Amino acid sequence: MDAEKLRDDDADIAILRVLRDDATADPATDPFLPDPLVLRAYREMRRIRLLDSRMVALQRQGRVGFYGAARGQEAVPIATGLALQPPDWVFPALREQSIMLVRGFPLSTFVAQVFGSSGDVLKGRQMPSHQSGRAVCQVSWSSCVGPQLPHAVGAAWAMRSRGSNEVAVAFCGDGATSTADFHMAMSAAGRWRVPCVIVCQNNHWSISVPAERQTASRTIAVKARAYGFPGVRVDGNDFLAMYAVARDAIERARTGGGPTFVEAVTYRMGAHSTSDDPSRYRSDAEVEEWARKDPLDRLRKHLASRDLLSDAADAALETELTAEIADAIAVAEAMPPPEPESLVGDVYAELPWHLREQLEELQKLAAPSTHG
């Protein structure tokens, strides 16, 4: 399902783009975003690209156990995060944790989750790269593919029932569209017309399964028709286009227009995770072809074409972000592990006898020995 081989005038497969090959914006589709917003987007995309690279290196050094990078897919979460309002809730999949940072979550606390240290708001209970935070209205995601989708639809139903102005945004990959949870969520969203946006990051690979083996439909977006609400295809490597689509879908949900399904056509340039070797199932030529559509490079060239970013300013930004990331890692890695008491916390309002006994035994084992 290569977007470049599809006819844009076909209603089933049309894909929205703003950035042209020369990095200028097509005036027919340009959302004409304010300069500070586009510069903010570039900074956020730069930061998560640098952070991902650093964390993958730490995993290879044995300093963290696992990491899932978003290299090549940064435009989708950053654009969506910037289009949200603070009370809106996010139900992510693997590559949308950066929305938390866009919404103000502290970087050192974000990194602490990967280390599982005492600075982790989840108290080390969730595996790395599964960040969440109530402070920024983002729930944890499950490595089981798809269950966040019906959760988001249920939350959106509750939002509408209580008359709030909030929106739920859920994410999935192309592989999740083959799960029962996807179809259940789509059916419920359409039937109840809830204030929900479901974004599929079609990165062409569900780990090692190519997108064309996931479905017989011409696109993923067209599936929304069967459930009674709009499906939109957008170039997920084009920040301007992705922001425009996310903004409009969120506003439609907020004003009572019901759900929207967004298929963001993008590409995972790196491995699925640090546990994956993509060379076993895809060619270097395919990766190189998509590298020429790198969302970060496209936005940088666009900013340069508008005289908003110089090479010197870009180099200074990299230096600033590299230092910020290094400081956050140093803080998170220096933190001690969570206290043993946290193992039995948040389970019961009053700790029952059997957990109290287990905790006491653990504390005895953890206590430093007094024998020389």
Image (tube, grey):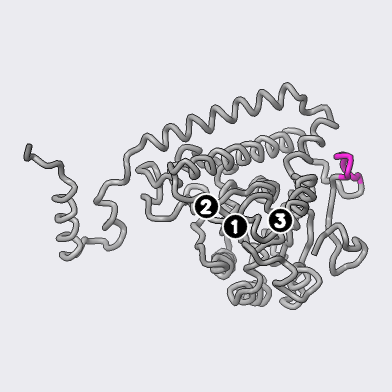
How far apart marks 2 and 1 lie (CA) works out to: 11 Å
In the rendered image, residue 252, in percent from the top left (x then y), is placed at 72, 60
Please state, as top left, top right, bottom left or bottom right, where the C terminus lies in the image: top left
Q: Main secondary structure of the magenta part?
A: loop
The picture quadrant where one finds residue 24 is top right
Contact (Cβ within 8 Å) of mark 3 with mark 2: no
Circle 2 SS class: loop
Magenta residue span: 20-27
Viewer-closest of 146 and 245: 146
How far apart marks 3 and 2 lie (CA) works out to: 18 Å
The picture quadrant where one finds residue 127 is bottom left
In the rendered image, residue 193, in percent from the top left (x then y), is placed at 67, 71
Query: Is residue 21 highlighted in magenta?
Result: yes
In the rendered image, residue 196, in percent from the top left (x then y), is placed at 64, 64
Q: Which dot marks residue 137?
A: 2
Residue bearing the label numbered 1: 166
Residue bearing the label numbered 3: 251
